[in-house]
């Protein structure tokens, strides 16, 4: 989700900058929107990474085996 949002924010930043170059924006709007989009996407990306780490830690603390052997074959 974070990577998708980051890609969409890059597209939006290109649109914001092109609007600014054409002069279709209010003064200061382009810089505020650019900073907002980049920071928000990095925050969502970091939150996703932290969530993955916490989830893996949670499953590891359950002390369950990684697999269960159904039956043992004698050789």
Image (cartoon, rainbow, N blue to C red):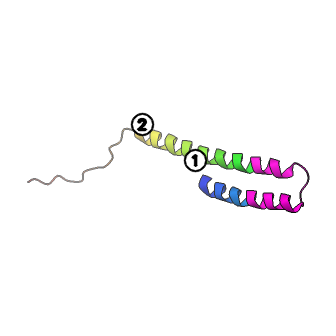
For the N terminus, give its image quadrant.
bottom right
Q: Element under label 2? A: helix
Is residue 49 positioned above or below 6 on the image?
Answer: above
Task: Give the farthest residue toward the front.
Answer: 21
Residue 9, image x and y in percent? 70, 56
Residue 43, image x and y in percent? 65, 44
Residue at 46% from the left image edge and 39% from the top image edge: 57
Residue at 41% from the left image edge and 40% from the top image edge: 60
Residue 70, image x and y in percent? 24, 53
Reading the image, the residue beneath label 1 is 48
Residue at 14% from the left image edge and 54% from the top image edge: 73
Query: Which region of the structure is painted magenta?
Result: 13-35
Between circles 2 and 1, the one closer to the viewer is: 1
Task: Give the farthest residue toward the right.
Answer: 26
Task: Give the farthest residue toward the left.
Answer: 75
Which badge, 2 or 1, comes first in the chain's sequence?
1
Does the stretch in magenta take in 72? no
Residue at 70% from the left image edge and 49% from the top image edge: 38
Residue 48, image x and y in percent? 58, 47
Judge by depth and name the residue closer to the eye, 59 or 36. Answer: 36
Horizontal relation, residue 71 to residue 13: left or right: left
Q: Element under label 1? A: helix
Horizontal relation, residue 72 to residue 52: left or right: left
Q: How many other residues sit within 10 Å of disc 1, few (<14), some (14-19) or many (≥20)?
A: some
Q: Quadrant of residue 23?
A: bottom right
Give the overall secondary structure of the magenta segment. Answer: helix
Q: Quadrant of residue 10?
A: bottom right
Reading the image, the residue beneath label 2 is 61
């Amino acid at each position: 989700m974070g990577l998708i949002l980051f890609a969409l924010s890059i597209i939006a930043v290109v649109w914001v900058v092109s609007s600014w170059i054409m002069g279709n924006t209010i003064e200061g709007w382009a810089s505020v929107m650019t900073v907002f989009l980049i920071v928000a996407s990095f925050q969502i990306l970091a939150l996703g990474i932290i969530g993955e780490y916490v989830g893996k830690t949670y499953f590891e603390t359950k002390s369950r085996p990684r697999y269960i052997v159904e039956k043992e074959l004698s050789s």
